Each structure stands twice: as structure tokens, then as C-alpha cells.
Image (tube, grey):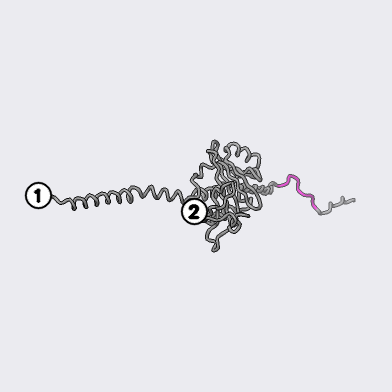
């Protein structure tokens, strides 16, 4: 019996297409999703990789550095207002400018977490002549981090978009001027993270405990040894 070639050829084509679809959809999907997630992320570093951060705002420049806990502890003993006693051997955040102080870990960690996990909501190509329209001539803040491997990354936060649902930002902008720049939209949480008074970047001072009031002196119940003198007049002696 002679087998026709056409059905076999169609079957072979179907098997090849099925294998291609399986490899593309099942095995290739995790790699594509990972690559897409990496593209959407603002940065690829991890929060624990950061060793120092400089935050520049229109009013001031703040710098923080990971510092050995022993050094911070000694500074805390010297400054009674510092309310942190970290464990020895750890690295903790310390403010180095404009003041020397123990940093408030929650404030620093919030900003770094946003930078390490933040997403690009949208990417635009903007001519260099239009940078001011997005607030980059007077940015809200510029955050620059230095990693343990000495790499540096920079985030420039511009003004909010038209409906204030996002902020315009530049991620690692080139140092040299170019005809076109990439502008991304990021979460407005960044504005909350950088707009803080100086006191919110420092560790809170410990609450002073009220001193114990001295107990009132107990009244003595002992009777006096000498009775009080009588007010009655002393009778005069009778003369015969």
C-alpha cells in the first residue's frame, strides 16, 4: 500500500509549529516577562547595595552614608539627643550634612525602596530645548546614590504631569548635552519621599522620663518630751 506524501508533510508541519508555539509560549514566557520587568524598572540595583545618598532640593543638600554601628553609637553617647543605640557590627544610616546626626532609617529606606523598585509608567523622547517645560530647569529634587561596587546612579525629579497622576523624571541623564533626552513618568510617591523637613531625616530624640517626685515627709506622731507651758498665772504666796 502506497502512503500519500501530502498528509505526512502536513503532519510534520503541524508538529513543527506546535513545538515552536510550545517553546515560545511556555518556556520563553518567563524570560520575556523578566526582560520586560527589567526594562520597566527605573534602576537595576537593590536597596541593600546603596552605601551613600545625596539629596539635593531647592532649599538644601542632604547627604547620608552607611556607617558602622559602633561609630554611630559613640556619637549617640556624645549627643544625648540621638535616640538610637544600634547593634554593634551592623551598618546604619547616618546624616553627614548639613548636620552630623543619626539618620531616621524609615525616611531614608522609603526613598531608596522607591528608587530600587519603582517602575517607568511611560517613556517620552523630549528635545533638549523643551527640558524646562517638564520642570528640569528647577527640579523638585535630585537623588544620587553610590553603590558598594562604586557605581553611581542619578534620578532627577521634575514637575507633575497635567493631572498630577505622575512626575516627570530623568534616569541617569547623560552628563553631556544632547539634542534629545528620555523622560519617564514615575509615581508621585517620590514627591512625598523627598519633600520632608530636616527634622524628619533625623532619628527622634528619646522622650525624657519625668523624674520621680519625692514622697511627702511623714508627720511625726511622737509626743513632745516637755509639755507646753500653761498660760494660767502663778499664784503669789500668802503673807500672814
- Residue 1's label in the rendered image is 1
Q: Residues within 10 Å of mark 2 (few under 14, many from 20)?
A: some
Residue where numbered disc 2 is placed: 120
Q: Position of residue 42 (x, y in %)?
A: 50, 50
Q: Residues within 10 Å of mark 1 (few under 14, many from 20)?
A: few
**Residue drawn at (62%, 54%) of the image:** 137
Label located before the other in sequence (2 or 1)? 1
Which of labels 2 and 1 is toward the front? Answer: 1
Front one among 206 and 70: 70
**Residue drawn at (58%, 36%) of the image:** 70
Left or right, residue 188 beside residue 22: right
Left or right, residue 160 beside residue 13: right
Q: Is 231 a magenta residue?
A: no
Left or right, residue 158 beside residue 17: right
Q: Secondary structure at mark 2?
A: loop
Q: Which residues are magenta?
A: 223-230
Q: Position of residue 151 (x, y in %)?
A: 54, 41
Q: Secondary structure at mark 1?
A: loop
Q: Position of residue 138 (x, y in %)?
A: 63, 55
Q: Quadrant of residue 103?
A: top right
Marks 2 and 1, how far apart in space? 64 Å
Amino acid at each position: 500500500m502506497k502512503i500519500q506524501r501530502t498528509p505526512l508533510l502536513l503532519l510534520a508541519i503541524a508538529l513543527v509549529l506546535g513545538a515552536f508555539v510550545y517553546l515560545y509560549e511556555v518556556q520563553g514566557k518567563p524570560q520575556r516577562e523578566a526582560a520586560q520587568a527589567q526594562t520597566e524598572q527605573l534602576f537595576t540595583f537593590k536597596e541593600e547595595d546603596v552605601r551613600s545618598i545625596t539629596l539635593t532640593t531647592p532649599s538644601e543638600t542632604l547627604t547620608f552614608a552607611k556607617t558602622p554601628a559602633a561609630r554611630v553609637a559613640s556619637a549617640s553617647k556624645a549627643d544625648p539627643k540621638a535616640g538610637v543605640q544600634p547593634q554593634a557590627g551592623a551598618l546604619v544610616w547616618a546624616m553627614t550634612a548639613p548636620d552630623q546626626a543619626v539618620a531616621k532609617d524609615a525616611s531614608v529606606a522609603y526613598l531608596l525602596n522607591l528608587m530600587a523598585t519603582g517602575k517607568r509608567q511611560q517613556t517620552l523622547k523630549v528635545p533638549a530645548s523643551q527640558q524646562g517645560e517638564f520642570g528640569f530647569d528647577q527640579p523638585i529634587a535630585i537623588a544620587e546614590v553610590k553603590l558598594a561596587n562604586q557605581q553611581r546612579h542619578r534620578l532627577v525629579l521634575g514637575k507633575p504631569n497635567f493631572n498630577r497622576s505622575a512626575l516627570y523624571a530623568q534616569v541617569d541623564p547623560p552628563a553631556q548635552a544632547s539634542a534629545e533626552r528620555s523622560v519617564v513618568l514615575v509615581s508621585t510617591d517620590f514627591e512625598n519621599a523627598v519633600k520632608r523637613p530636616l527634622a524628619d531625616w533625623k532619628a527622634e530624640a528619646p522622650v525624657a522620663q519625668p523624674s520621680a517626685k519625692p514622697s511627702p515627709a511623714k508627720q511625726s506622731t511622737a509626743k513632745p518630751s516637755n509639755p507646753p507651758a500653761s498660760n494660767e498665772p502663778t499664784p503669789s504666796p500668802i503673807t500672814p
